[in-house]
Image (tube, grey):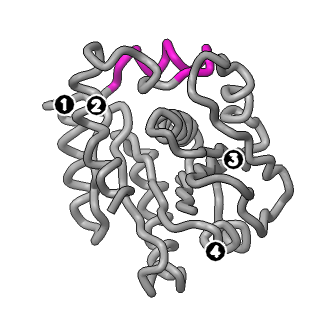
Amino acid sequence: MQTILIANPKGGAGKSTLATNLATYFAWKGHKAALGDLDRQQSAAHWLSLRSHNFPPIGHWDCDEELPTKLPKGYERAVIDTPAGLRGKKLEAMLKLSDHILVPVQPSSFDMWASQDFFARLAEEKRIRKGKVNVGVVGMRVKANTRASKQLADFLAQFELPVLSCLRDTQYYLQTLPRGMGIFDLPAPRLVRDLEQWQPILEWLET
């Protein structure tokens, strides 16, 4: 089973948005997908409770315990939303269960400063050094051709990590989340630009 950990030490970086939309994509692809939520706020779990039965199902991985040690049975893809400040034994435990880590980063100084320390911490993890866990970065709420987007690009260029894509700041994410939906639940013709931005992320996960 493929397991994707969505992690960033700062709150509000876009972890839940990335996790819920990724789970939605897997569900539409016909995979048996599960969504886990380690955050005390349980935002992703609440989103899942709002999901209509008319859409492809996404299973709930009940991983409320402090340190999950086992993956859910009967699934092909698992996406894990995590709280801010994931580090130490909790981070190490989740890395043992994961194949990939996606790190969402917004084009703000606070997000970039927090991510810098997190990238350094990841570089010290044994499973990552040995190539057992792949790490990819996703820019979130990025407005193209702005000073902030240029600063984010310059910041990420200093790390030896693949910057997979930058997702634009669009109302589609805000409109779908309160309804238990992701953008992949919407008609594809409305999402040409957004699907193009997601494609490098999805291809990286598939390979």
Three-letter code for the amino acid on which mark 4 is drawn: Lys
Image coords of residue 160 (percent x, y): 28, 71
Say if residue 152 shows up in the picture: no
Label 1, secondary structure: give it. Answer: loop
Residue 36, numbered circle = 3
Disc on the earlier residue, 3 or 2: 3
Q: Work out how far the residue at label 2 is from the one at label 4, CA to CA, in angstroms.
A: 31 Å
Say if residue 177 shows up in the picture: yes
Residue under pointer 4: 96
Image point 53% across, 80% down: which residue? 125
Which of the two discs, 4 and 1, sits closer to the camera?
A: 4
Residue under pointer 2: 195
Residue under pointer 1: 144
Tell whether 143 sits left or right of 182. left
Give the mark count: 4
Report the quarter where the N terminus lies: bottom right
Image coords of residue 175 (percent x, y): 49, 12
Tell whether 62 sits left or right of 90. right
Q: Circles 4 and 1: CB distance less than 8 Å?
A: no
Label 2, secondary structure: give it. Answer: helix
| Mark 4 nearby-residue class (10 Å; few <14, some 14–19, many ≥20) | few
Q: Nearer the viewer, residue 119 or 19?
A: 19
Which residues are drawn in magenta?
A: 169-181
Above or below — where is 51 with respect to 122? above
Q: Work out how far the residue at label 3 is from the one at label 2, CA to CA, in angstroms.
A: 24 Å
